[in-house]
Image (cartoon, coloured by chain):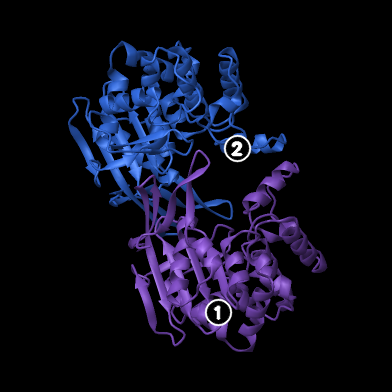
Chain colours: A purple, B blue
Amino acid sequence: MIRLRTGVPLIEIERSGVVESVHTGHLIVLAPDGSVRFSAGEPAQPVFARSSLKPLQAVGMLRAGVDFSAMELTLAASSHSGSPQHQQLIADELRAAGLTEDDLECPPDLPLGVAERRAHLMAGLAESRLAMNCSGKHAGMLLACLRNGWPVSGYLSPAHPLQQLLAGTVGELTGEPIAATGVDGCGAPLFATSLVGLARAFSLLATGGAELRRLAEALRAHPDLLAGAGRAATRLMQAVPGLIAKDGAEGVFAAALPDGGAVAVKIDDGATRAAELALVIGLRQLGVSGPALDELGTAPVLGGGRPVGLIRPVHG
Amino acid sequence: MIRLRTGVPLIEIERSGVVESVHTGHLIVLAPDGSVRFSAGEPAQPVFARSSLKPLQAVGMLRAGVDFSAMELTLAASSHSGSPQHQQLIADELRAAGLTEDDLECPPDLPLGVAERRAHLMAGLAESRLAMNCSGKHAGMLLACLRNGWPVSGYLSPAHPLQQLLAGTVGELTGEPIAATGVDGCGAPLFATSLVGLARAFSLLATGGAELRRLAEALRAHPDLLAGAGRAATRLMQAVPGLIAKDGAEGVFAAALPDGGAVAVKIDDGATRAAELALVIGLRQLGVSGPALDELGTAPVLGGGRPVGLIRPVHG
């Protein structure tokens, strides 16, 4: 059995001068030439990179011949916030292909974005497959099946030809054999890779040839579709020219710059609040700076609604 | 500066046969005679026990002479889920004392309970001080001020006579000096204590003399007011005769049995999902068993809406 070995303290929560919580994890930073610029913990061990794999899987969908628009391609790689715009675009994509929301086969869920979830509930809406953050990926997978005459029913099985293609793509881009195959939260196959391999794949995405450039250009044009308003991935991509950044569940985050410098993070305990800050640590190692990194590099700890401490890097 | 030293792996998240995340932390289990039955990590170091301190603070409010009903006393010790019932009881308590919701001074918030928050939003309601999970504690503090002629304005200052009384009570019940004073999420003073001291205090609450018995009996009569429907503290108290259990933010949980056996937990990263399971580990060390512990001792990990793994004790 693959069992995560815990890493080193990366992020701490300080309240009133007391460090009350600590997040440990793993971080790899690759220089543009592929050499290791910074490493913490054990980034060579296999982890489930969860939704940080989606851009790699989207490359596989392109290889399957799907004629995506740039927006559809971005949504195929997204963990979208479930805004009305996100949902409408995917609904339109399904309808144009003669598919319905139930074909998605992802579980009904509320929107991932905090504000989007709130608006959804206040509008009297319930969980739906369309609102689920992976619905764009599932729509893209379905288009790949239709394009190749593969059965739509059962398309989430690891043995399905689409999933075989996506697994091969993930293995090729990470440059390593897939260590394990599991089931992601949305029901799709999930592949265990090392953070080093994940960073290498993101470096390729950000610098690669024609097929990869198409994806990179789509993501860079639509950072609001890859995540959502206010989310770290979207904010960083809007602030750092050419950056590609993708979050994943259970504390994973990966990013790469157009020069090929790349970062991958896994927080041992799965906390998003720590993964976002650890990604910023990695980006700073690549020489990135500016107001967005300053804003996302720490977060306030509140007491009675007022700042009384910080979530921050352990050696910050 | 007090800086949490990380503990040992306690809880792991297994998905499709891969342990993808791990929570480390600290656990102390005291036998009824006060001896250490089980220890993991470093439970002697000071931590902010957050809302797990509320029952101790409620003892201080009793010492201040507040003539609580059993329900009001339970709410004073609660992190309630923000149900309409919780809110109504506290609103009634304030009105009877000639106070208003704004006197609470806790920050406006949405209900803590997932279902309660959803119902609140679907009813078109926004953040309010009454809905905030600490509103019962703040109401109790205000009653203590009125009872003693202390100023209501500024009652959250650590220098206020009420807060001095509560600090003294926490120090006495834990049997150790307070290591640091900070600001809790609700704006009230927060005291750093060791998990050993916290467990010792809970043991006293569950076995102690008249003043402590009044609190224990109130909590045991109203576990639904101490937390809320479906929450771990409420479910455990409803299932285990005489148990007192209180959760806290940032991965803290404490509990005690009527015989004086006691448990206290701190998860390094602050995760509630891990604190609940770690508390069950501790209760099992005290010989507690049954369906509720089986249900709360693990949690399913979902893939496509179906169980594909478990959140479970590391050595489970």
- Which residue is found at the position 58% from the left and 31% from the top? B129
Q: Residues within 10 Å of mark 2 (few under 14, many from 20)?
A: many
Q: Quadrant of the N terminus of chain A?
A: bottom left
Name which quarter of the figure residue A62 lies in.
Answer: bottom right
Number of labels in the image equals 2
Q: Is residue A302 shown left or right of residue A97?
A: left
Question: Residue A66: percent from the left, percent from the top?
Answer: 71, 78
CA–CA distance in space, label 2 to label 1? 44 Å
Q: Which residue is mark 1?
A: A169
Q: Where B34 sits versus B298, above or below? A: above
**Is the C terminus of chain A in the top left, top right, bottom left or bottom right quadrant?**
bottom left
Residue at x-position 29% and y-position 52%? B6
Q: Chain of mark 2?
A: B
* SS for dot 1: helix
Q: Nearer the viewer, residue B196 or B38?
A: B196
Q: Position of residue A190 (x, y in %)?
A: 52, 66
Asked if labels 2 and 1 share a chain, the reply is no
Q: Give, as a three-letter code, the residue at label 2.
A: Leu
**Picture coordinates of residue B34 (x, y %)?**
19, 28
Q: Amino acid at mark 1?
A: Thr
Residue at 48% across, 12% down: B69
The answer to whether residue A136 of the structure is visible from this angle is: yes
Of the numbered discs in the image, which one, if any, rests on residue B110? Answer: 2
Residue A295 at x, y = what percent?
53, 61
Quadrant in the rendering for residue B190 = top left
Whether residue B9 sits left or right of residue A181 in the image: it is: left
